[in-house]
Image: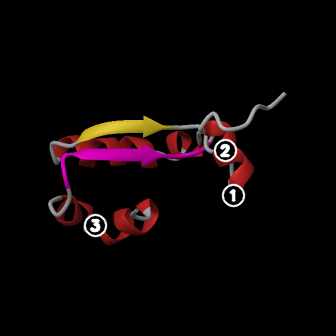
Amino acid sequence: MYILERALQQKNMPAELSKVGENVLLAYGGGSIKKNGVYDEMIKILKDAGKNIIEFSGIMSNPTYGYYKIMNGQMSLF
């Protein structure tokens, strides 16, 4: 797991990406990542590095174990 904001500030993401496989899971929440431009910047970096991008959006802030169980079909909301 890599903290996106720190990686972008340090401008070392391309070097870090060369150390990992070709598939990258981009997990994020409700959409501020798209509003502030970080999403576009990250997608460009990942594509330039030749990575396959798998997106997982809509993650709640500070997710709980119950949220994890719901997302994995282990528990029902109703």
Mark 2 closeness class: few <14, some 14–19, many ≥20 residues within 10 Å? few
Say if the magenta span includes residue 18: no
Label 3–label 2 contact, CB within 8 A: no
Which of 60 and 66 lies nearest the eye of the viewer?
66
Disc 1, SS: loop
Task: Provide the residue designation for mark 2.
Answer: 69
Disc 3, SS: loop
Whole-percent x, y for residue 74 in the image = 66, 38
Whole-percent x, y for residue 39 in the image = 43, 43
Q: How many numbered marks appear?
A: 3
Amino acid at dot 1: Asn
Whole-percent x, y for residue 36 in the image = 52, 47
Name the colour scheme. secondary structure
Say if the magenta span includes residue 28: yes
Nearer to us: label 1 or label 3? 1
Picture residue at 32% right of the left edge, 42% below the top: 43
Nearer to us: label 2 or label 1? 2
Picture residue at 62% right of the left edge, 38% below the top: 71
Task: Provide the residue designation for mark 1.
Answer: 62
Mark 1 closeness class: few <14, some 14–19, many ≥20 residues within 10 Å? few
Whether 27 is drawn above or below 64: the answer is: above
Label 1–label 3 contact, CB within 8 A: no
The alpha-carbon separation of the residues under discs 3 and 2 comes to 35 Å
Q: Earlier in the sequence, mark 1 or mark 3?
A: 3
Amino acid at dot 3: Lys
Amino acid at dot 2: Lys
Which span of residues is magenta-colored?
A: 21-29
Which of 7 and 76 lies nearest the eye of the viewer?
76
Picture residue at 84% right of the left edge, 27% below the top: 78
